[in-house]
Amino acid sequence: MKTVQIKKFLLLASLMIIISCTTGTDKKNVTPFPATWLEEMTIARLEEGYSKGSYTVTGVVKDYLDRISAIDKSGPGLNSVIIVNPDALQIAEELDMELKSGKVKGPLFGVPVMLKDNIDTHDKMPNTAGSRALRDNYPLKDSPLARKLREAGAVIIGKTNLSEWANFRASSSSSGWSGLGGQTKNPYVLDRNPCGSSSGSAAAVSANLCMLAIGTETDGSIVCPSNNNGVVGLKPTVGLISRSGIIPISFTQDTPGPIGRTVSDIAACLGPLTGIDSTDIRTLTSSGNSKNDYTIFLNSKGLKGKRIGLLKTDMGFSAKVDTLLMKVAEILKKEGAEVIIVEAPKVNIGEAALNVLLYEFKDGIDKYLGSTGTSLPVRDLKGLIEFNKKDSVELKYFDQKEFEQAQSKGDLNSKEYKESLTKILRAMREDGIDKMMNENRLDAIMSPTGSPAWKTDLILGDHFVGGNSSPAAIAGYPSLTLPMGFIGDLPVGVSFTGRAWSEPVLIEIAFSYEQASKQRKAPAFKVSDN
């Protein structure tokens, strides 16, 4: 009888261990996931380990792949990674040969990076935008961004899930859901939403499944997921980084940008990605405005003497968020900055802003699909709409109203398009950000990036409460967000926005604040906050 009782006890104990390992919620104990040494790793520490012979690229990449298997594909099941690069270990081995020969090159040598799955890579990974229509879209060449990452020594270890078509398809949607990849979860509380559209990129970085990720933004798609997933995200000036080879929404607003756990890592990644690309004319404007190295702006005293506008217009949607924002203001003052309360001018450009996106999406997506050179079931937006109608998954939860609206538009010579574009640029540039900064002699404007993550809802879609990504997005100006604290188990961020090409100033401000506040905290993969 005692033997039976002992066996029952051991079985119960084993089950408790399995449950604990599956949820991974008790951070006081050793986490059940592999390669815990990689948690909160930085580029600087990684590169130091390579130089001292403490790490190999193969070992690092293998451990990240093990973490993806344990955390993304099982365990918490984040579903942030849509595909792992089958050649990742081979690339790592080749870099290890360079390491042994002393021929190490590139500022991102051996750094494992993931790309949002709307960025072309010429390898065994398709570029899908999360759509089942593009599941066999294998690009014939690297995007300039992917090529620059490889030249800098980075290892592209996978592609991340996203809000399908970068969240430009339906009248409502659940961020982080795609027909091909399913629903991405928030690593802090799994039934909460990761925001989007760079959902998987931010969730993967936060969960320590890669060192860095590259997202893309048209309006909020880098800063919002960075907010919800407790990481650092930079939406650069449009034109700083090439958009060629990226599935488009808007020629005016689209930009890729880095997502990381620290401002230092963001700065290290940014420089290698800049430069003029003859196939993206917006990059011509970056001549004389871009830097090859942004790490020189990592100044812990960078707040001293800065004038920062606290945007009162964006407050009020949450008393708890406002409380955290005021704590940020106090830290900024303590570190030598002057904080000035400012208000944004009231404008009504919603219809014009949507018109620009609709016209530019139709133009851009038709050009992308028509030039892939691959055998796809669709070659233009009209064909894509018909594909979705016949597919068993694509319209299961959400409609394609924005696709249909875009298809009804004319070309970019339309009077409606030109007038809408002129209206929104003036409202957000000369009469908006530039005016506020000039009148108040500001170095940057700060505001809450958003609310804590809402519960994922595949019936009603996203439940946005607050945030202010649109002015910088429409103006094409930079915005940098980083963690400012927690509300319960959920992180929230603060955004610093500036003039065109002001990334150096924003990095100085954000780094100085980060060093003074230290608000980043790794996720606990809590099942629910109920």
Image (spheres, helix red, strand yellow):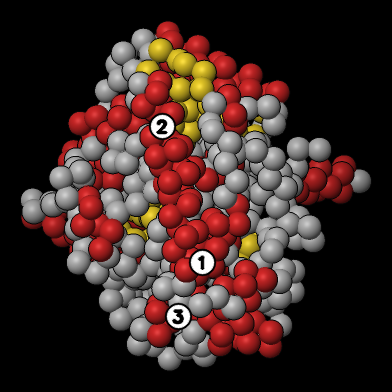
Q: Position of residue 345 (x, y in %)?
A: 54, 33
Residue bearing the label numbered 3: 366
Residue that label 2 marks: 435
User: How far apart are labels 2 and 3 at the CA level?
Assistant: 37 Å
Q: Amino acid at mark 2?
A: Lys
Amino acid residing under circle 1? Glu
Where, quadrant-wise, is the C terminus in this rendering? top right
Amino acid of disc 3: Asp
**Seen in the image, is 5 located left or right of residue 382?**
right
The residue beneath circle 1 is: 416
Task: Please tell me which residue lies in front, 478 or 198.
Answer: 478
Quarter location, residue 434: top left
Q: What residue sits 28% from the left and 71% below the top?
A: 142
Identify the mark at residue 199; answer none if there is no mark: none
Element on which disc 1 rests: helix
Q: Label 3 to label 1, Cα distance in Å?
A: 20 Å
Nearer the N terminus, badge 2 or badge 1? 1
Measure the C-alpha gap from mark 2 to mark 1. 26 Å
Q: Residues within 10 Å of mark 3 (few under 14, many from 20)?
A: some
Q: Residues within 10 Å of mark 1 (few under 14, many from 20)?
A: some
**Outermost residue toward the left in this view:** 102
Identify whether 408 is placed above or below 16. below
Image side of residue 401 versus residue 411, left or right? right
Residue 168, image x, y percentages = 57, 64
The picture places residue 467, in percent across and down from the top left corner, at: 59, 39
